[in-house]
Amino acid sequence: MVGSVLSRKDLDKVIEGQDAVINCLGPHLLFNNNDIDICSRSQQLIIDSMINHGVRRLIVVSTQGVGDSSVNISSTQKFFGRLFSGKILDDKEMQEKIIMKYSDQLDWTIIRPGKLSNGNLTNKWRLNDKLTFTKISRANVACFIMKELRNSDWLQMALTISG
């Protein structure tokens, strides 16, 4: 379907009748301010539609450095992360807060990958590892998402994933 994540009408069309929502949204370009807050702006609409249609399961891809994952980041990483991605991190932080507000109505999992690459699927990853910001392939993140969708091992938790 073609639509906008900022249109409740469009969201209702895609969410109605589904068992789960997987949200991997992020801004299109690093320096494109038009959609720099797309994650937080759309998340509330997505949740409203999910609740309206009785869909409880939500898996969201966020980023390392957000929430409690920031404690594992060196001061150098924090500095450059804020310098180059501060608005994106702020948006992801807001998105996560919106999600957690609905813990009584949603079965959510937040996945915070390290640096994403276009590498191969290896079925190998580390969860909540202290070595943050290591690369992980998009294929491995997708594989983990599908595993979590089946098993629900990380309900109402945020975790980091790295390669």
Image (spheres, rainbow, N blue to C red):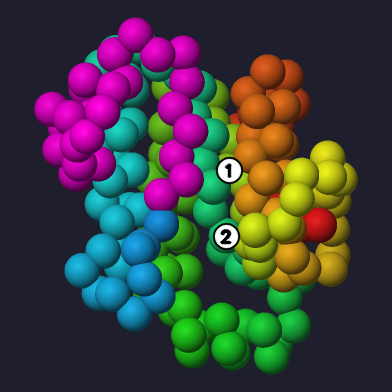
Residue 69 visible in the snapshot: no
At mark 1, the secondary structure is strand
Q: Say which mark, if any, is on residue 161.
A: none
At mark 2, the secondary structure is loop
Screen quadrant of the C terminus? bottom right
Above or below, 7 against 28 in this view is above
Residue 10 visible in the snapshot: yes
Kindly indicate whether the residue at mark 2 contacts the one at mark 1 (C-beta within 8 angstroms). Answer: no
Can you give x and y, in whole percent of width and height, for residue 8 in the image? Answer: 16, 32
How many dots with numbers?
A: 2
Mark 1 burial class by Cα count in 10 Å: few <14, some 14-19, many 20+ = many
Left or right of 80 in this view: 126: right
Dividing the picture into quarters, in which one does residue 157 lie? top right
Residue in front for this viewpoint, 142 or 152: 142
Can you give x and y, in whole percent of width and height, for residue 21 in the image? Answer: 44, 27
In the image, what residue occupies the spot 28% across and 46% down? 42
Mark 2 burial class by Cα count in 10 Å: few <14, some 14-19, many 20+ = many
Dividing the picture into quarters, in which one does residue 53 lie? top left
Q: Is residue 4 magenta?
A: yes
Q: Earlier along the polypeptide chain: callout 1 or callout 2?
A: 2
Q: Is residue 105 magenta?
A: no
Q: Which residue position holds label 2?
A: 63
Q: Amino acid at mark 1?
A: Ile
Above or below, 14 against 65 in this view is above
Q: Amino acid at mark 2?
A: Thr
Q: Which residue position holds label 1?
A: 110
Screen quadrant of the N terminus? top left
Above or below, 51 against 46 in this view is above
Residue in front for this viewpoint, 31 or 80: 31
The magenta segment: 1-25
